[in-house]
Image: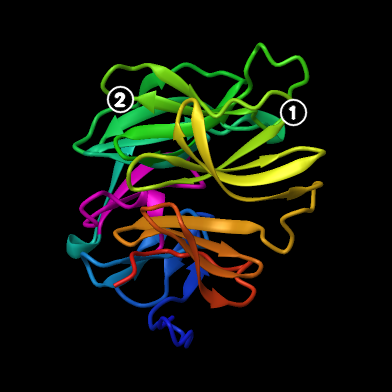
Amino acid sequence: MQLPQGQVSLAPSTTLAASPTGGWETVAPPVLSGDQDEESWDPALGRWLPATPGELSPSGTQYAYIDQATGSVHLVTPASDSDVVLSTGVGYQVVGWVNEEIYLTAAGTAGAQPQGLYRVSAAGGGVTTALPPSTAETWYLSAQGAIWGTGVNPQDQNPPASGSGDEVLRYDLATGTVTTWSYAPGLTVNLLGVTSTGQPVELVEGPQANTLEVATSPTAATRLLAGAGLDSLQPFEVSSTFTDSHGTWLTTDSGLYLLTPSLTLDLEQTGNFANADVVGPCG
């Protein structure tokens, strides 16, 4: 897409096909494998890769994926057409990279939420445990040197339904501690993304009001949008976020928005972007 004209064109070499192992692979050579029907633009290599933004290494020269047939953790180096098995296992999902370590979570059984946090070095070696499995914690993404997720606070007398959280959690890699952000008793807190300064973007949902906000600290938040009722922010439903040097991009039912570093929400392009993702940095 070209901004601000809003002209959309199909990027070349973006077609994926189902692979024999149950995952996905690129149609254009060299054939690269991935675990989801989703691609990301890699500016370091100047091409599309069969990986989510969270699966790409910080340098953009490698990506990790899970073999759907065996559960093994793979590391791909597209420049050399290398696909190496880092570790075998069953049911892992890639959370993201921090430096040269790949963080994983284990998929829950029988449709349950992912559990636990694990890591494996891109240089090789087995999977080690960072945080033990917990039914009250779910880890989603890595950002600004930390792992982020949601949890259910044990002090909440009216916690949200199973599979949802009432607080945002930050796992500090330097200290190994988990810090609670944005605890909202009796409400559902959805982690949408994290700004370039390490502030979580979240949607707080409840029977009386929905609030789109940025948690500026564990005890304070800046409200971006609010309204009454479960559907109050319709058609403003955030389907994806992506943070780059410009700010945090949000694709929604009503348009493409940019959350600037000064925490203003700017409409960049109107339209229904409910089925769209920002999958690479904007030039």
Which residue lies at the image location 79% right of the left edge and 47% below the top edge?
228
Q: Position of residue 142 (x, y in %)?
A: 38, 39
Quadrant housing the C terminus: bottom left
Q: Nearer the viewer, residue 106 or 201?
A: 201
Residue at the top extreme of this rendering: 155
- Left or right: 47, with 149 as reference point: left
Q: CA distance from mark 1 to mark 2?
A: 28 Å
Q: What residue sits right under mark 2 in the picture?
A: 173
Amino acid found under the numbered disc labelled 2: Leu
Which residue lies at the image location 21% right of the left edge and 57% below the top edge?
61
Q: In the image, which residues are magenta?
A: 50-77
Label whose residue precedes the other's in the sequence (1 or 2): 1
Residue 60 within the magenta-colored segment of the rendering = yes
Q: Quadrant of residue 141?
A: top left
From what the image shows, is residue 257 above or below residue 68?
below
Which residue lies at the image location 74% right of the left edge and 28% below the top edge?
160
- Left or right: 113, with 83 as reference point: right
Q: Position of residue 32 (x, y in %)?
A: 35, 64
Residue 98 within the magenta-colored segment of the rendering = no
Q: Position of residue 115 (x, y in %)?
A: 55, 26
Q: Secondary structure at mark 2?
A: loop
